[in-house]
């Protein structure tokens, strides 16, 4: 708090206070001095807290602006990517229509071609799992 004040300086200050104020009123004066220093510290802490709140609020505002800018840029990017993907799918679909190629869904995909025999349908479905039996609690003897 006080720069370059050592033990000798504190002893001199205490001796002067004892002589000027007197031994009877010295505790009262020190108590009031302590209360005054406490108020100063409380005001400093309040100022520091309000300053930290303002700094935190400005950081939050800046982060909100950055997030909003990122969302807007992502929205623009997604729109551009979606348009590009749709264009590619349209080109693939047009080339398939032009070549008259037909594709059947795979057997593992769940749907079977219309000409598949009944045995193939039975083989494609996995067998049901056996049910577990619960153990009956034995009566205690």
Image (cartoon, grey):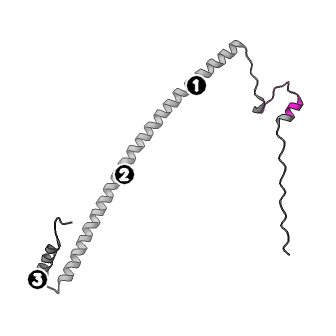
Residue drawn at 21 percent across, 82 percent down = 27
Q: Position of residue 70 (x, y in %)?
A: 45, 37
Instruction: Give the mark, 2 or 3, whose residue is nearer the N terminus.
Output: 3
| Res. 85 mark | 1
Residue drawn at 66 percent across, 19 percent down = 93
Task: State which quadrant residue 116 falls in.
Answer: top right
Task: State which quadrant residue 42 falls in.
Answer: bottom left
Which of these two is toward me, 87 or 137? 137
| Res. 111 mark | none
Say above or below: 56 vs 138: above
Tell us which disc is closer to us: 2 or 3: 3
Q: Which residue is mark 3?
A: 19
Residue drawn at 83 percent across, 37 percent down = 125
Q: Position of residue 49 (x, y in %)?
A: 33, 59
**Residue 5 is covered by the magenta coloring:** no
Say above or below: 17 vs 49: below
Q: Position of residue 120 (x, y in %)?
A: 86, 31
Say above or below: 114 vs 96: below
| Res. 56 mark | 2
Q: Position of residue 82 (x, y in %)?
A: 56, 27
User: What whole-number distance in Å separates the C-alpha atoms at marks 3 and 1?
Assistant: 91 Å
Describe the element under mark 3 as helix, strand or loop: helix
Residue drawn at 13 percent across, 76 percent down = 13
């Amino acid at each position: 708090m006080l720069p370059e004040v050592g033990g000798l300086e504190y002893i001199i200050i205490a001796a002067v206070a004892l002589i000027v104020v007197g031994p009877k009123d010295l505790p009262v004066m020190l108590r009031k001095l302590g209360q005054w220093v406490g108020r100063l510290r409380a005001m400093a802490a309040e100022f520091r807290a309000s300053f930290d709140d303002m700094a935190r609020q400005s950081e939050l505002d800046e982060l909100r602006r950055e997030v909003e800018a990122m969302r807007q840029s992502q929205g623009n990017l997604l729109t551009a990517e979606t348009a590009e993907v749709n264009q590619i799918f349209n080109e693939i679909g047009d080339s398939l229509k032009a070549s008259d190629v037909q594709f059947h869904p795979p057997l593992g995909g769940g749907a079977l071609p219309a000409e598949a025999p009944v045995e193939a349908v039975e083989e494609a479905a996995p067998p049901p799992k056996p049910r577990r039996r619960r153990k009956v609690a034995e009566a205690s003897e």
